[in-house]
Image (cartoon, coloured by chain):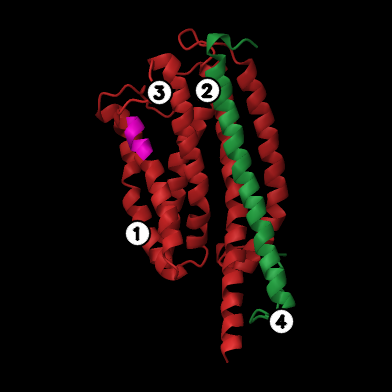
Chain colours: A red, B green
Amino acid sequence: MTLTDLANPTKFLALTARLLPWLVGATILLFLIGLYQSATAPDDYQQGATVKIMFIHVPNAWLSMFVWAVMSAAALGTLVWRHPLADVAAKAAAPIGAAFTFLALLTGSLWGRPMWGTYWEWDARLTSVLILFLMYLGLMALWRAVEDPSRAARAAAVLTLVGAINLPIIKFSVDWWNTLHQPASVFRMGGPTLDHAFLIPLLVMALAFTLLFVTLHLAAMRNEILRRRVRSLQMMQASQKAA
Amino acid sequence: MSLGSYASFILASYLAAALVVAILIGWIALDYRIQKRHLRELEESGVIRRSGRSATEIK
């Protein structure tokens, strides 16, 4: 199956039906391994047991940006190549990205209270991630507000690409400004600074959440294709009744 | 496994993640059933796709 074949929604649905059971199985397996490793990971000498919050906070924070990057690629697909599934991909990804961003903010707050003494601080990293969350909500509202799907797709694609400016701001906020949030400790020049006892469960959980995203995204794309099929059939029905 | 004095923060984080993921899965599964039901109803009312294929066909 080529990329061109995937432009055909029916072929895409067939591929999704074949892939989803395997993805669900792999996601569950990775979560079981990741959760076991998280539960048995030692306490950090500074953070104590709260280091376990990192195993869900960090993957969700990574995914909050990754999902917007996926939506930005899809936005290019909508505006430049007019790929039939590009807008479907972007629209299906937005609520999942919003959920990951919400979890990153929430678990970050729950870690911050015992470690920093506060649930929230208006520092550059936290504020830029909050803006990302609001952009997800705005984008979802835009898709709902514009009735014509092709107009909604173009407007959402432009907004997504404009919003992508926030991604490097989030990533480098800890370097550009003096923030309460600690600098990168995994993806950095010179390699990770984390001990393997924490790095391995973190990476397994990150892979598990990434597979969860892929699984949910494919399922949500399938739903969106069916929703558009319903819409076109309802329009056919209405025109048949009018004729 | 001892979670120490911050157990409530750790458990709240994991429970919140589980809840949000469960809501996402439930919402996507419910949406799938709703769309399939709409398509079945449209097909039963005699509306067919231009290709002539079943609207609920996904394989």
When asked about the image quadrant of residue A151, the answer is bottom left
Whole-percent x, y for residue B18 in the image: 61, 33
- Say which quarter of the image contains residue B2: top right
Q: Which residue is the site of mark 4?
A: B46
Amino acid type of the residue tagged 4 in the rendering = Gly
Q: Amino acid at mark 3?
A: Tyr
Disc 4 versus disc 2: nearer the observer: 4
Q: Mark 1: give few (<14), some (14-19) or many (20+) Cα within 10 Å.
A: some
Confirm or deny contact between disc 2 and disc 1 (CB under 8 A).
no
- Mark 3 or mark 2: name the one nearer the start of the chain: 2
Instruction: From the viewer's side, name the closer residue of A174 and B42.
Output: B42
Near mark 3 (Cα within 10 A), the count class, few <14, some 14-19 or many ≥20, is some
Question: Which amino acid type is shown beneath numbered disc 1?
Answer: Val
Dominant SS of magenta comes to helix
Disc 4 with disc 2 on a shared chain: no
Which numbered dot is residue A158? Answer: 1
- Give residue A238's position: percent from left, percent from top: 58, 82
Horizontal relation, residue B56 to residue A65: left or right? right
Q: Please give the chain letter of the residue carrying mark 4.
A: B
For discs 3 and 1, the disc positioned in front in the rendered view: 3
Extreme residue in the bottom direction? A243
C-alpha distance separating marks 3 and 2: 14 Å
Q: Nearer the viewer, mark 3 or mark 2?
A: 3
Q: Which residue is mark 3?
A: A119
Where disc 3 sits, the SS reads loop
Task: Judge whether residue A127 is colored magenta.
Answer: yes
Q: Nearer the viewer, mark 4 or mark 1?
A: 4
Which residue of the protein is positioned furthest toward the front in this rendering? A242
Quadrant location, the C terminus of chain B: bottom right
Q: Amino acid at mark 2?
A: Ile
Identify residue for label 2: A53
